[in-house]
């Protein structure tokens, strides 16, 4: 009941969105283990990859257990994007995704991301160059258009198919819509009917029922979940079961939520330098996993005062105890780890070619 992108078979129709600052290796792994069939790195600058920028390449570290994984690139120069795609091949990702949807001013200002929806000649050259440079399927992620007056997702999707792109994700909002208002799923349906390659629908899937509805209403091949997965990796297995078997699994219990949060935390901590800096992104996850629970507002206020991983864990354990969830401290101690050591990525391998 999955879908395919080129020769790559995915075992379900639910995929995790690229999320800058959020979809790091640990979060991707947690989502894979909870039913996402495909994950992506956050967008990275093609120029940074081509120049071997250390920080950029670190964003591409992934564990073998995360596969299948796509590396997402943004850029505006076809030669640079092709060089970056060739360099990324050293990591042997399962696919390369091109970002034609980012609305951020610093990206659009460089004629990249969603700005390319206004410059289809350049978009075509970038996509063709990436397809020629990569040995894996190249996919693309677009928005419905630049603004409401220039919705062109069907035309762009057809053009990308013509360039040899293997699948297109359509975020059903224009650049002008940023992340507000309701996504217009009709745009996904029109893109799907314009092409033979798979179309992945995206925008406003917050519950398993939304995923089922998007598949039915638009005819899309798969559904990408972004914000709906924050603090809620269960959405993948729950949506999957609903789509495949018509069964709506109950939402996770408070204990399940806090235990997965602590496991996620242990995974991040184990792979970090344990600095204060490494703690900041995890605080956001704590807020998301506990959203809506009694006392979550107070917890969020205390998060800003946590100065170490121990503080953060203690806060969650005590929060759980207040809600009647006992034994979380034992859970923390006994938790053994989800997987092996991280794949260090390009910066450690230099340019010696693909891993054995
Ligand atoms: C914090 C955040 C970071 C994002 N980063 C990326 C990114 O790196 N690349 C990308 O293509 N889209 C990015 N997006 C857009 C999402 O992938 C997705 O298209 C959007 O959130 C709509 O889906 P949703 O309604 O399921 O969240 C980001 C969105 C958010 C909220």
Image (cartoon, grey):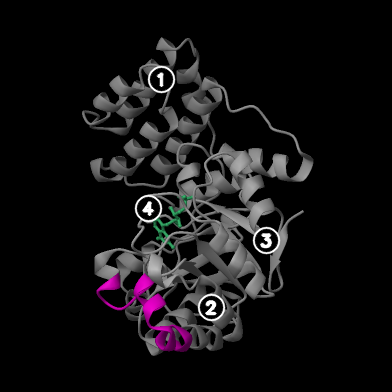
Which numbered circle lies on residue 179? Answer: 4
Q: Earlier in the sequence, mark 1 or mark 2?
A: 2
Marks 4 and 2: which is nearer the front? 2
Q: How far apart in space, not on screen, are marks 1 and 4 (Cα)?
A: 34 Å
Q: Is residue 143 left or right of residue 115?
A: right
Q: Is residue 53 magenta?
A: no
Instruction: Work out how far the residue at label 3 is from the one at label 1, CA to CA, in angstroms.
Output: 41 Å
Task: State the residue at coordinates (56%, 59%).
Answer: 186
Q: Nearer the viewer, residue 152 or 164?
A: 152
Q: Is mark 4 within 8 Å of ligand 1?
A: yes
- Identify the disc placed on residue 317: 1
Q: CA distance from mark 1 to mark 2?
A: 52 Å
**Residue that numbered label 3 is attached to:** 221
Residue at figure coordinates x 67%, y 61% from the top left? 221
Give the secondary structure at mark 1.
helix
CA separation, marks 4 and 2?
22 Å
For label 2, the crowd category at 10 Å Cα-Cα, with few meaning under 14, some 14 to 19 and many 20 or more, is some
In the rendered image of this protein, does residue 195 appear above or below residue 304?
Answer: below
- Decide: marks 1, 4 in contact (CB < 8 A)? no
Is 242 situated left or right of 81 in this image? right
Residue 257 x/y as whole percent: 51, 27
């Amino acid at each position: 009941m999955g879908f395919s992108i080129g020769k790559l078979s995915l075992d379900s129709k639910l995929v995790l969105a690229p999320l800058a600052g959020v979809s790091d290796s640990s979060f991707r792994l947690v989502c894979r283990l909870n039913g996402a069939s495909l994950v992506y790195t956050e967008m990275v600058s093609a120029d940074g990859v081509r120049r071997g920028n250390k920080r950029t390449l670190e964003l591409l570290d992934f564990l073998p257990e995360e596969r299948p994984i796509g590396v997402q690139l943004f850029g505006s120069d076809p030669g640079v994007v092709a060089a970056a795609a060739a360099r990324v091949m050293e990591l042997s990702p399962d696919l390369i995704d091109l970002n034609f949807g980012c609305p951020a001013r610093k990206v659009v200002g460089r004629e990249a991301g969603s700005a390319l929806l206004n410059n289809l000649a350049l978009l075509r050259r970038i996509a063709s160059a990436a397809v020629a440079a990569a040995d894996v399927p190249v996919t693309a992620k677009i928005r419905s258009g630049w603004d409401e007056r220039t919705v062109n997702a069907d035309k762009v999707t057809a053009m990308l198919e013509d360039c040899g792109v293997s699948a297109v994700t359509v975020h059903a909002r224009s650049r002008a819509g940023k992340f507000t208002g309701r996504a217009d799923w009709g745009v996904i349906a029109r893109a799907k009917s314009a092409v033979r390659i798979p179309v992945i629908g995206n925008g406003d899937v917050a519950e398993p029922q939304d995923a089922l509805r998007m598949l039915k209403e638009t005819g899309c091949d798969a559904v990408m979940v972004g914000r709906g997965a924050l603090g809620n990796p269960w959405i993948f297995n729950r949506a999957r079961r609903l789509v495949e078997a018509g069964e709506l699994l109950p939402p996770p219990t408070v204990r399940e939520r806090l235990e997965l949060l602590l496991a996620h935390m242990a995974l991040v901590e184990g792979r970090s330098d344990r600095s204060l800096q490494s703690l900041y992104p995890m605080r956001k996850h704590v807020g998301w996993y506990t959203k809506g629970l009694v006392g979550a507002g107070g917890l969020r206020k205390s998060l800003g005062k946590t100065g170490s991983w121990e503080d953060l864990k203690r806060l969650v354990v005590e929060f759980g105890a207040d809600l009647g969830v006992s034994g979380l401290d034992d859970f923390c101690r006994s938790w053994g780890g989800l997987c092996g050591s991280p794949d260090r990525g390009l910066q450690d391998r230099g340019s010696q070619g693909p891993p054995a």
